[in-house]
Amino acid sequence: MKKTNFDEYLEKQMKDPDFAARFKQAGDAWDVALQIVALREKVGLTQKELAKRLHTSQQQISRLESPSYEGHSLSMLRRVAQALKVNVRIVFEPVPSVSRVAESCAPYRTRPRKEKKGNNR
């Protein structure tokens, strides 16, 4: 299968360690885009062929596969999933609590100072 412009772009960018690190932390929009690309390619469809199955444009498929696109609707994701013969699963997860490393509120010295004789402080 012929590589898309995005595939070629991504391949070049992933050679840059800084880009690769940011890419790994990019988040859900990236995950959705990359999953759609991978699934589409797995079944051997081009963007244009998938668009035809969904009765939409190739530009819309390109947008869905763009890592910067965050406008994925659940209804469109379901349509894409149906065309690619997969299921959509949405998971809500609790936000991990932020653990902060800080000094305790207790004073450094837990025993009172012994006063020296002859010292009237």
Image (tube, grey):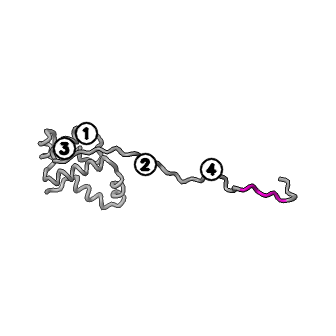
Gap between marks 1 and 3 measured at Cα: 10 Å
Residue at 22% from the left image edge and 49% from the top image edge: 36
Quadrant housing the N terminus = bottom left
**Residue 114 point in image, percent of width and height:** 79, 58
**Residue 23 point in image, percent of width and height:** 33, 54
Gap between marks 2 and 3 measured at Cα: 31 Å
Residue at 14% from the left image edge and 50% from the top image edge: 46
Q: Earlier in the sequence, mark 2 or mark 4?
A: 2
Helix, strand or loop at mark 1: helix
The type of residue carrying mark 2 is: Pro
Q: Earlier in the sequence, mark 2 or mark 3?
A: 3
Q: Earlier in the sequence, mark 1 or mark 3?
A: 1
- Asked whether the beta carbons under mark 2 and mark 1 sit within 8 Å of each other, the answer is no
Segment tinted magenta in the rendering:
111-116
Question: Which one is in front in this view, the residue at disc 4 or the one at disc 3?
Answer: 4
Q: Is residue 23 left or right of residue 86?
A: right
According to the image, label 4 marks what residue? Answer: 105
Q: Earlier in the sequence, mark 4 or mark 3?
A: 3
Residue at 35% from the left image edge and 61% from the top image edge: 17
According to the image, label 2 marks what residue? Answer: 96
The type of residue carrying mark 4 is: Cys
**Residue 68 point in image, percent of width and height:** 30, 46
Gap between marks 2 and 4 measured at Cα: 24 Å
The type of residue carrying mark 1 is: Leu
Q: Which label sits on residue 74?
A: 1
- Asked whether the beta carbons under mark 2 and mark 4 sit within 8 Å of each other, the answer is no
Q: Which label sits on residue 80?
A: 3
Neighbours of disc 3 within 10 Å: few (<14), some (14-19), many (20+) = many
Gap between marks 4 and 3 measured at Cα: 55 Å
